[in-house]
Amino acid sequence: MPDLRTTAQRLEDVTAQASYWKGKLRIIEKQMRKLEKETKEEISQVQVETKQKEMVWNAESDSLRRQIEQLTHQLIQATADKKELQKRLGDV
């Protein structure tokens, strides 16, 4: 049967180990909170950048759509003018 000194020493050792691991756990928890904060900030930044790019893309898309509509209208008008000109030349 272990004597009282051995038991006291073991208790001291276990207490020291518990204290060590408690300190390690605090460090890990602090690092996790820091990483969580950084991750949230990065996600927020990416969301802002994505929204900005989406707005630019939408503006460019709208601009291209208007240009296509204008060119289509010009093509239709040019085709009609060509037919009218051919008709006039044929009538001469």
Image (spheres, helix red, strand yellow):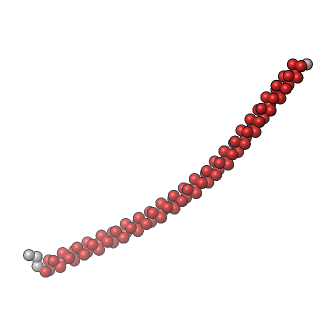
The C terminus lies in quadrant: top right
Above/below status of 6 relative to 45: below
Question: Which of these two is toward me, 2 or 83?
Answer: 83
Task: Name the residue rendered at 54%, 56% in the picture.
Answer: 46
The x and y percentages for residue 59 are: 67, 48
Image-based side of 46 in relation to 2, left or right: right
Task: Name the residue rendered at 34%, 68% in the picture.
Answer: 25
Q: Quadrant of residue 88?
A: top right
Task: Name the residue rendered at 74%, 35% in the picture.
Answer: 72
Q: Quadrant of residue 71?
A: top right
Image-based side of 7 in relation to 64, left or right: left
The N terminus lies in quadrant: bottom left
The x and y percentages for residue 47 are: 55, 56
Task: Name the residue rendered at 44%, 63% in the picture.
Answer: 35
Residue at the extreme right: 92
Above/below status of 6 relative to 89: below
Image-based side of 46 in relation to 3, left or right: right
Above/below status of 71 relative to 31: above
